[in-house]
Amino acid sequence: IQASDVSHTMQHWHIYRKWNQRLFGEMYQAYVSGRSDRDPGEFWYKGELGFFDFYIIPLAKKLKDCGVFGVSSDEYLNYAVKNREEWEQRGQEVVAEMANELKTKYPSPQKADEPVKSSELEATLQKSTQNGVKSSDVLRRKVDQGVSA
């Protein structure tokens, strides 16, 4: 069960990137909608390194040692190590690309001390609903922040 949940980290780089980008996107949407207080762009690079070092690679080694996947266990461990190395080299660039793409797609959260004008609220609502964000979530966040005319 553990291996299936994180199997993307033990496959080809492009598979790892695909699923990593999807998770990053979910975390960013949670941040924008107010369900998370942390922008994943601020911690994603280092978090992935730690995830590889303290969970993925040790898990891949255990899978190899117990032989549960036969000869494929070597392959999974090798991909995990290679993906970790690739992430260390290119991860910051990858995070910047993902963050930039999502910032243009989804509105950023407004800081609590900055009043929001009603015209900005209308534009935010329109863009958010086009991107699949519930207007009630956006309204609730904006009302909590205080909307000015």
Image (cartoon, helix red, strand yellow):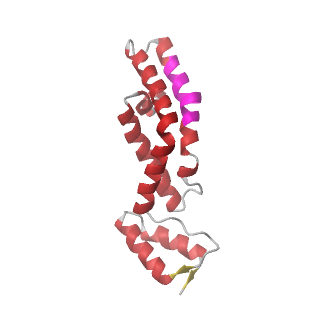
> Dividing the picture into quarters, in which one does residue 70 lie?
top left
Magenta part of the chain:
49-62
Residue ID at (50%, 61%): 32
Residue ID at (38%, 28%): 11
* Left or right: 97, with 147 as reference point: left
In the figure, 86 relative to 120: above or below? Answer: above
Residue ID at (59%, 34%): 50
Q: Residue furthest right?
A: 113
Residue ID at (38%, 16%): 72
* Left or right: 75, with 147 as reference point: left
Instruction: Give the main secondary structure of the magenta stretch.
Output: helix
Q: Residue furthest bottom?
A: 149
Give the image location of residue 71, x and y in percent: 38, 12
Number of numbered discs visible in the structure rendering: 0
In the figure, 148 relative to 84: above or below? Answer: below
Give the image location of residue 122, x and y in percent: 43, 79
In this view of the protein, which residue sits in the foreground, 135 or 29?
29
In the figure, 63 relative to 128: above or below? Answer: above
Give the image location of residue 134, x and y in percent: 42, 66
> Dividing the picture into quarters, in which one does residue 130 lie?
bottom left
Q: For residue 78: magenta?
A: no
Give the image location of residue 81, x and y in percent: 48, 24
